[in-house]
Image (cartoon, grey):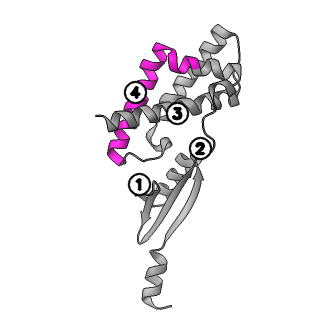
Amino acid sequence: MNANEINAKQSATKAITVKRSEWNETAKRLECSGWYYIGTPTATGKTIYRRGNSEIEIIIEDEQPAPEFSELSHAAQCLDIYLHNTREIYERYTVPAIKEAARRMRLYGVNIPANVAIDYTITGDAMDAARALVVKYDHLHPTASDCTAAFVGYDDYIMESATFEVENA
């Protein structure tokens, strides 16, 4: 191999596909290994990391679309209702999550992956508050799958709202 072939091989972009739920852990591992986030080109929607002459494209794989409300279990429907319609949860958790997602979209580009834009500490707290209301008022104990199903729709709502806020600001 000559020097040009070596440089071409080193500068080749590698692609990695990760599930949306694994994105945060993947990003942390890359950054700890010396890779630097350089952006998300809007044309591709892929996240790019660079180290030296090498680049990695991270392709976020959506796991499942949000289920329709009628497809949710009764406990998940209750969670969904509390997440979207309880004023205290909305003002305390949802609004800050939308604002933070919109801020990150403005900073990094509108087409960044949802799990990069959303602060999961805030939304996790919202889910905990909704779960407590379901137990208290509906006398149901949501399972992990109930929470996941309701969270997918909540996550989509936050991203949709943040995108609207960015596009119409």
- Direction from residue 86 to residue 72 in the image, left or right: right
Tell me if mark 2 has few (under 14), some (14-19) or many (20+) residues whose alpha carbon lies within 10 angstroms of its own.
few
Q: What element carries label 4?
A: helix
Q: Which of marks 2 and 3 is in front?
A: 3
The Cα atoms of the two marked residues, 4 and 2, are separated by: 21 Å
Mark drawn on residue 40: 1
Q: What residue type is labelled 3?
A: Asp
Determine if the magenta segment contains residue 36: no
Give the numbered dot on residue 155.
3
Mark sitting earlier along the chain (3/4): 4
How many badges with numbers are in the image?
A: 4
Pointer 2 residue = 21
Between marks 1 and 2 in the image, the one whose residue lies nearer the viewer: 1
Q: Main secondary structure of the magenta part?
A: helix
Q: Quadrant of residue 132?
A: top right
Q: Is mark 2 on a helix, strand or loop?
A: helix
Which element is circle 3 on? helix
Q: Mark 4 points at which residue?
A: 96
| Magenta highlight range | 81-108
Q: Residue at x 36, y 48 (%)?
A: 108
Query: Which of the two marks, 4 or 1, is nearer to us in this view?
Result: 1
Evaluate if marks 1 and 3 touch, with contact meaning CB atoms under 8 Å apart.
no
CA gap between label 1 and label 3 equals 20 Å
The type of residue carrying mark 2 is: Ser
Drawn side of residue 35 relative to residue 74, left or right: left
